[in-house]
Image (cartoon, coloured by chain):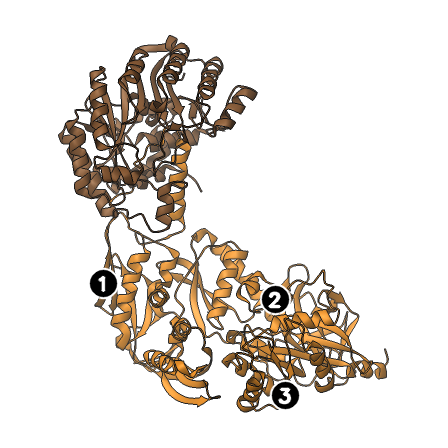
Chain colours: A brown, B orange
Amino acid sequence: MVNAVYLHIPFCDYICHYCDFNKIFMQGQPVNDYLEHMDVEMKNTLDRFPTNKIDTIFVGGGTPTALNEEQLEKFLKDVQDRFGPYVTDKLEFTMEANPGSVTPEKLRIMKSYGVNRLSIGAQAFQDSLLTRLGRGHSVEEIGEIVQMAKQEGFTNLSLDLMFGLPDQTIDQFSETISRALELGITHVSSYSLQVEKKTVFYNQWRKGELPLPTEEAEADMYALLISRLEEAGLSQYEISNFAKEGFESKHNITYWKNDEYYGIGAGAHSYIDGVRRANAGPLKQYMNRIDENGFPYMDDNVLTKAERMEEEMFMGLRMREGVSKQRFEVKFGQPMFSVFGKQIEDLTSKNLLQDTGTHISLTEKGFFLGNEVFQEFLTID
Amino acid sequence: MNREEMLKRQSKIRNFSIIAHIDHGKSTLADRILERTGALTDREMKDQTLDAMDLERERGITIKLNSVQLTYKAKDGEEYIFHLIDTPGHVDFSYEVSRSLAACEGALLIVDAAQGIEAQTLANVYLALDNDLEILPVINKIDLPSAEPERVRQEVEDVIGLDASEAVLASAKSGIGIEDILEQIVEKVPAPQGDPEGPLQALIFDSLYDPYRGVVAYIRITEGTVKVGDKIRMMATGKEFEVNEIGVFNPKPVSKEYLSVGDVGFLTAAIKNVGDSRVGDTITSVKNSAAKPLPGYRRMNPMVYCGLYPVDSAQYNDLREALERLELNDSSLQYEAETSQALGFGFRCGFLGLLHMEIVQERIEREFNIDLITTAPSVIYQVKLTDGEEVIIDNPAMMPDAQSITEVQEPYVKATIMAPNDYVGAIMELCQGKRGDFIDMQYMDESRVNIVYHLPLSEIVYDFFDQLKSSTKGYASFDYELIGYRESNLVKMDILLNAEKIDALSIIVHRDFAYDRGKDITETLKDLIPRQQFEVPIQASIGQKIVARSTIKAMRKNVLAKCYGGDISRKRKLLEKQKEGKKRMKTVGKVEVPQEAFMAVLRQDNTKNN
């Protein structure tokens, strides 16, 4: 059964220079029509793939908080109508929120429909870097959104922070970490910049106009991040994620534990009954597909057992606790070592993996060289 | 056809080839001739028809020879049979050139009206003169604004010593002068001499392998007649076959009943191995054998060797098959199995020169889909040992210990360089830096000089050509020929990765240059080899002595720290891409080394120039 829901709001007031997610300038878009189609998709999805309970809901984007108050309310009401009957008391309901696009009224609407966690796109605490990233907000507005959220009674707050940015110094990143911690948040996601195609950064990089930090500097930033956050009581429970005890993101753990999830909205991905599907990304195509046959799927990718086992490893190893040997055996009917014994042994000898008795997990070194580990579990030829 | 008719036909045959420097318009002229003689309809006309392989088109050179039969109705009202025999345009293939010239009675010498004679042209003209060919100078590209036909005409007379008073002024591109060229071929190129009923002598000037018909030998009949069903013998190898098919190219292959004196065409005889029909060999008939083969046959000896290894060692047998297949078309390619500690099983291959080497590598990669690791090319060293023994070394890794060597000799070449005199200083500086001995310098006219140096072949193999081009802005032309061996103060330099000697990276260098070269190589390798999970020292050593050192720092961070939401397949693709990249590398000891690194010895100087 599926117990997690991802919903995608692709609209943005501005496009960040690094972003390659499915997103679109909000102005002039058929937002209401889109939300209507999401509602149809939710209904059809639950009809076709019923659930017994919903533990986590995550609304991502794009910029979900770019919706105006009416749109936001309509959307959240639809979500409540469709998934409300199944949610448990312990529901984690996250919305991504961007500094500058949130009002107290929007927060009140979110709260009233059960949103209990905000993932705030802070990224950096230097206005010069925010400008370089194409973020449409200031450092000041990061403080404001956090204060506002607290006033409205949100207690589970996460900040996104980026490192490895063009012209970013280690001192700047250190300042970013300090300022973030001063805000008294419960969770941090910290991502290193990946230059992706079809972004402003990619074009700058091609022209040689993107002075990225060296591998050394980036590694130093990552090491600093881990030590500073751990010191502050936010422990690293996944490669890019840090939380106070009990505030780990349940929704993201769904992905890492290789459990299933619904994916609703343009360009969203779902994993249901062993099948991975991607929804059409462009609004028009997304809506047309729903109009025509009720679902916006582009293709069905039925995973083989081998693929599922590989994913169990390369996703699960992202977590500090690693992959449970027992869980693996229950899930796949054979012991982890009978499938991946050679890889585990080899990577353990290189001090990249360790056996904790119950789990196989990354070592400290392994956290820095995760891809070196993960690719060993792919059996492509 | 009776004897008289055959002799009459023979008197109407004209066999010729075209000698030209690259870019002087050989292919264009050949196309015009094909057009004018109606060999191709406009619709069939594809630019530069004779250069059939993709590689040839890309590089603008001819590698494999082609020959076509054309009919031309001359102004005297008679119909003539022309055979145009194409020649490869590169110094590496000078033996092939000499054999195809031997199949002709005449040659068109194409000289660019703006650029004048180039070193390569000169080399081929001498080959043509050696073969007693009637040479018809053609001054091409006369419609270029910078054309100086009279100056070039004078140059042909002064430099080559030919009478150029009747040289045709032409523009192959614009179709100017083509008729005159064809008429001169009729008038000046002698008809083939020989007795159609005499004992068969047919020169093989090229051969290629066809999977259905076996070897297709390109032949020129000098004496006698050959027919389908005849029993024939290859005079150098002694192998006998029965002729299956005979024909000519027009330019499409057309079957014929027989070929007789003066004819140029092809022959198949279920020959399984191109080694059995070697370029330069003579075919005779078993029944009526010739007493002697035609002169000039020699087995080609490679000048340059390198190791070829499959990146994926599982492809070793595929590589062997690829080499076997290429050898069918290329009897000058030599190879034997060799084993490298670093690279595993592969082949040491001998080539006529660097271009030949590159072409073979590219063909293996493209046509046979095998990723290759190529070691830096080496020349052949003659080594005298303290025990009096002499050994031949074509692989630097096999060079004996310095203590057991009394003398090392290396091949030298005579290099002929032609360039505008503004570049004399730059050329001399380059040649001195490459251990060259100045031999001669002559002014060809007020503005162009011909410089002769003796140079070690190994320096040419490294990067001489590239450096010459860059230091003369591409104006110099260059040709070389082997002149023999000389003693040199040479040492073997080993490269160690992670304290492990990598045999495939060993090179032989002059002692005076060893430190600099060691420094260059270790620095280049540092940039070419990606970071590993541990620090990798790179050292260059002579014997036990480390002469240069650099370090590849350990990989610090390689982890996907990005949120792709539920898009797991994207994560998978990214990891697969990284893994795929690694598969293209060779694991040497514990270090993953990309293909390019094995050519680092060459790379260093090139990168410095560019």
Residue under numbered circle 3: B132
* Residue B531 vs residue B124, the one in the foreground: B124
**How would you rate the neighbour count of disc 2 (Cα within 10 Å): few for under 14, some for 14-19, many for 20 or more?**
many
Residue under disc 3 on the same chain as residue under disc 2: yes
Tell me what residue is drawn at x 40 percent, y 43 percent: B577
Tell me the CA gap for discs 3 and 2: 27 Å
Label for residue B549?
A: 1
* Residue B349 vs residue B518, the one in the foreground: B518
First in sequence, mark 1 or 3: give its number. 3
Query: Considering only vertical position in the picture, is B427 above or below B162?
Result: above
- Location of the N terminus of chain B by quadrant is bottom right
Q: Position of residue B166 (x, y in %)?
A: 66, 88
Q: What chain is tagged by disc 2?
A: B
| Mark 1 secondary-structure assignment | strand
Residue under disc 2 on the same chain as residue under disc 1: yes
Q: Position of residue A60 (x, y in %)?
A: 35, 25
Query: Considering only vertical position in the picture, is B53 above or below B332?
Result: above
Residue under numbered circle 2: B51
| Mark 3 secondary-structure assignment | loop
Tell me what residue is drawn at x 33 percent, y 25 percent: A257
Q: What chain is tagged by disc 3?
A: B
Tell me the CA gap for discs 2 and 1: 47 Å
Tell me what residue is drawn at x 46 percent, y 17 percent: A36
Question: Is residue A14 something that shows in the picture?
Answer: yes
First in sequence, mark 3 or 2: give its number. 2
Left or right, A381 with reference to B48: left
Q: What chain is tagged by disc 1?
A: B
The amino acid pointed to by label 2 is: Asp
